[in-house]
Image (tube, rainbow, N blue to C red):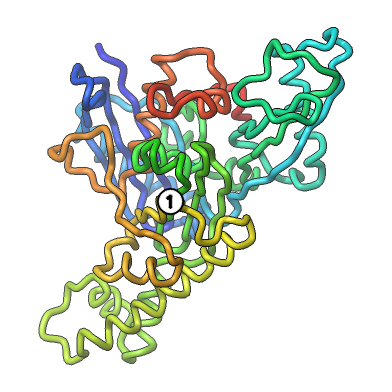
Amino acid sequence: MARVYTGIDIGSSHIKIVVATPAENPEFPMRILGTGTTPSKGVRSGYVVDVKEATKNLREALTRARSAAKVPIRSARLALGGISLEDIRSTGEITLTPSGGIVTEREMERATSESEKRAGSKLINRTVLHTIPLEYRVDGQKVFGRPEGLQGTKLAVDVLFITILAKHRDDAEEIVEAAGVEVESAMAAPLAASFVTLNKAQRTAGVILANIGAETLSTIVFDNDMPFSVKVFPTGSSDVTNAIALAFKIPLAEAEQMKRGAVTGSSIPPQKMNTVIAACLKQMFTKINVHLKSIGRQGLLPAGIVLTGGGSGYALITEVAKNTLKLPAQIAQIGFLPRSSGLDATWAVAYGLCRLSYMEDMEEGQSFGEIIRRTWDSVWNTARSLLP
């Protein structure tokens, strides 16, 4: 029987599960067997607040996914997100004397370990999800590619650590295990989504992927085909609902329906509704703009912003993004799947996990950071040893 891959995305609004298997079509290397989704009660801003309630809803989503896929689900890869997800940068430097002045795999590992030590107090109460070497230098000179085999006296490496509060990771894994599924490994949700929504040209030129959820706005910036920044903001599409309710003095349930365009014959003029929605979206993109300025990328991402998530479906969202960020803007589409799959970009995280698991099986033994540095188009692999 062909290998089955399962990805679990526990969002603030919904739990989404994708079950997939390898296909023989090289253009579409995976086939969707089934999906399952339920409202994510017991989850707030991307992290578990009620283990019992969250477990109950996850079990329901798993039941639906099993029924649709007609296969058992015994293990899965888990996406981790929420407001405690953040990146930490650190530089490690070592002397090369122990290896006779030659850069070896061992010395590269030593330099990476040194960078984690230097991160020090920033890692207290946090767990490292991904360790990504961004740049190596030998005697102060930048190395293009891997430095292994080069000669010098000092080796330095700049490392991007993608981290999350250990408590939030533990709680998320607890509800998956309680639902009867083994957690194969965990990965940052924005990174998972990027595997199936961004192409090499975008990542190389410079791009930001923004996932607008119910209560969080998750972003990941790429530059020169490498992850450059991960940032999660405590805002989302529920803020749009609240703004509509306040502006027009209507119940939240009605405001939610109006936001989705599900109310006909309303006395509220569409122009006024769009004005309220646009104001909320502008606030979100302003937060992103401030962040881009802080990392030196404001107005400097030629591939612009790619929007995904349940809150990316507003008709005017790309226009607001363009005007606020002064960047190109577009709605994400899932790659590596035929249109008949029925999955839109709101499933990007869960499907990205499946896609990554598949590539991990195809290319064993490579570290996550090494694979990112080498190529994203041919191999997407994660070394479990880098995931605590």
Question: How many marks on residues?
Answer: 1
The amino acid type of the residue labelled 1 equals Leu
Residue 339 image offset from top left, x and y in percent: 15, 40
In the rendered image, the vertical position of residue 169 relative to residue 114, given as above or below: below
Q: Examine the image and state in which quarter residue 113 appears.
A: top right
Q: Is residue 103 left or right of residue 317?
A: right
Give the residue at the far top of this rendering.
100
At x 48%, y 30%, the residue is 183
Q: Examine the image and state in which quarter residue 294 appears.
A: bottom right
Residue 155 image offset from top left, x and y in percent: 79, 24
- 322 and 30: which is toward the camera: 322
Residue 124 image offset from top left, x and y in percent: 76, 45
Quadrant location of the C terminus in the rendered image: top right
In the rendered image, the vertical position of residue 374 relative to residue 206, given as above or below: above
Q: Is residue 377 visible?
A: yes
Circle 1 residues within 10 Å: few <14, some 14–19, many ≥20: many
Residue 59 image offset from top left, x and y in percent: 36, 41
At x 53%, y 37%, the residue is 226
Q: Is residue 173 visible?
A: no
- 289 and 251: which is toward the camera: 289
At x 30%, y 36%, the residue is 18
In the rendered image, the vertical position of residue 328 relative to residue 56, given as above or below: below
- 263 and 375: which is toward the camera: 375
At x 76%, y 24%, the residue is 138
In the rendered image, the vertical position of residue 323 relative to residue 23, given as above or below: below
Pointer 1: what residue?
209
